[in-house]
Image (cartoon, rainbow, N blue to C red):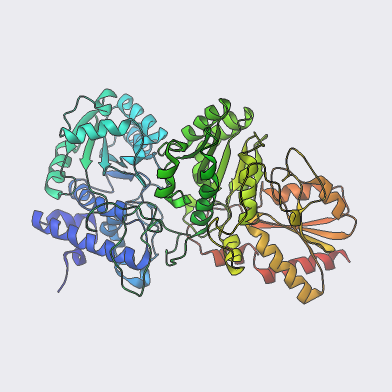
Amino acid sequence: MGTLLDGIDSPQDLKNLTGDELDRLAQEIRTLLIDYCRRYGGHLGSNLAVVEATIALHRVFDLPHDHLVFDVSHQAYTHKILTGRKQAFTNPERFGGVSGFTSPEESEYDDFVLGHTGTSISLACGLAKTRDLAGGTGNVIAFIGDGALSSGPAFEGLNWAAEQGGNLIIVVNDNEMSIAENHGGLYRSLAALRATGGQSERNPFRDLNLDYRYVEEGNSIGPLVQAFSEIKDIDHPVVVHIHTRKGLGLGQGRSEEPGAGADEPTLPALPAEGQVEANHWQNGIKANSKAANSRKVYGRMAMQALQPRFQNEPGLVVISPATPLSNGIDPEFRSEAGRHYLDVGIAESHAVAFAAGLAKAGGTPVVATSSTFFQRAYDQIEQEMAINGSAITLLNFSTGISGTDATHSGASDIAMMNSIPGLTCLAPGSGDDFLRMLAWATGPARRPVVIRVPGERILASERAAGLPDTLEGRLSMEPGMAPDSNHSGTGTDSQDPWNSYGIVRKGNTVAILGLGDMLPQACRVADSLRERAGINATVMDPHQYSHPDLTTLQALDRNHRLVVTMEDGQLLGGWGQGIAASCESNTIQVLTFGADKEINDRVPLTILNQRYGLNTEVMTDSIISALQGRD
């Protein structure tokens, strides 16, 4: 027996369905999404909340003549299903055939590649303004969640929308939570509006001179169709505030259990085969491993190390601009940390500026988020943090080359951070060094520090060595801990124990410098050189990418012919180029490995490693060829 969804190939097909049929279609899509995410992973809870709203929008408006801009766009699965891409959700052979976010390369129904928060209203303002200047017609709709409203760009967009005027529809999807719980005074006003059916005097949208409508039954197609029909072709900006339930269809409650998924309710019991976490796209492919990823392992480890210090260090605080669980800041830590943990909402710029104020007053702030989210605070990292010498520690997650979607790639983080004067940039080559660096940065350093949190290569290496995924069994952490004596370098700096490169293996002829997550690969290449060419290479852990360790590099010149740098980031403007430039006056040659300057969207890591020549065999061949070229 066929389904209603079988007959839906474009939004036009919705126009002929009855109200009852639209409700049946919503249930079919909800069942499909749950099955899809069980088998493949993805953003489940956020998509389940907006099934009815998406159907209603496509029923009432005329896309793509009208424009629909999703904020973040991680809730656009139903939109994709309705706009000719349902095979990517129904046919297992096509899973992964579309992005987890909107993409103009996929469909004329998508205007932007999106994956970050708070920009939908500004983007919609731009579309509407161009329409008006050209004397065009049509509706422009921004669809933004309540969690995204805490983002600075969202406030700026709302403020400008009222000034701009003209047709602009802002749908606020209020499911009472973001990736974790919401924080900030705005949410008291939203709660008051929900409690009064939209009649509360505490209305931030009306305060901004925006028209306002409220729909309590945000998961009922009938009321939504009526509300959208009433404001279609409106001649001024309007906010339609809809109350939805995140994770509708998964049972009672919204849980945020460790390991469940950063922004999703825990799924019911799953069948043995195809069992996956329903969480954020991990590496852009699928979340099919029960083992915690490096973000959660090392993030939890860091929180476990900091927590015992809270009692004696009142100024030590951890700040998360939302997304805490993704980075190992689990509910247990947040509860026990109390006032030492602050979630400022999706507001990265505020998080860093706020931390600068804390540091100026003598506090010790630690700001933790993903590398592509720190991009949103680049101005504050340079201005409020580096120029002012603010003693802030940034824990930089999800760095380096990965097979993730285009908007979450961390391949440019080294080039981004090492270009800022006054910022100490650390790249631990092990979990223990990560803890030592964190202890030093939050202890005697009293300077701006960013630490690249170890990634999957280091985690795999440590698991293979039998090291635990928790603090238990590892080193004890006290502020001011120095590097391991086994990683000593040739230079010393009492003010910065990480200033000199550490020697992991002593050798000659070739010195391989593996920055951070590339250190395990450096060791593998050294093994390959010994097996294939009899070369006993030196392997070094650089510890930092702020500046070249000239003392060590000059010392290598005495008994090494080739320095090899390895980084899991783009070469142009990166760390290896700085090493090469510093060695130009020496007789030693430098060979650099890293990524091209390009944007990739869900290209598997194995393919990227091939493309960039980062496989062990290719690297070994390149090193041998470079040596032969000098003979």
Q: Is residue 465 above or below residue 83?
A: below
| Residue 124: x %, y % from top left | 34, 38
| Residue 156: x %, y % from top left | 39, 30
Q: Is residue 88 left or right of 432 when viewed as pictured?
A: left
Q: Residue furthest front?
A: 312
User: Can residue 332 be seen?
Assistant: yes
Depth check, front residue: 95 or 510: 510
In the picture, which quadrant includes the C terminus? bottom right
Where residue 89 sits, quadrant-wise, is bottom left
| Residue 158: x %, y % from top left | 33, 30
Identified at 28% across, 61% down, the residue is 33
Where residue 233 sits, quadrant-wise, is top left
Q: Is residue 140 left or right of 305 when viewed as pictured?
A: left
Identified at 55% across, 55% down, the residue is 471
Q: Is residue 608 left or right of 590 when viewed as pictured?
A: left
Q: Is residue 99 left or right of 369 when viewed as pictured?
A: left
In the picture, which quadrant includes the N terminus? bottom left
Across the whole image, how many numbered discs are drawn on residues? 0
User: Can residue 113 be seen?
Assistant: no
| Residue 31: x %, y % from top left | 23, 63
Depth check, front residue: 320 or 249: 320
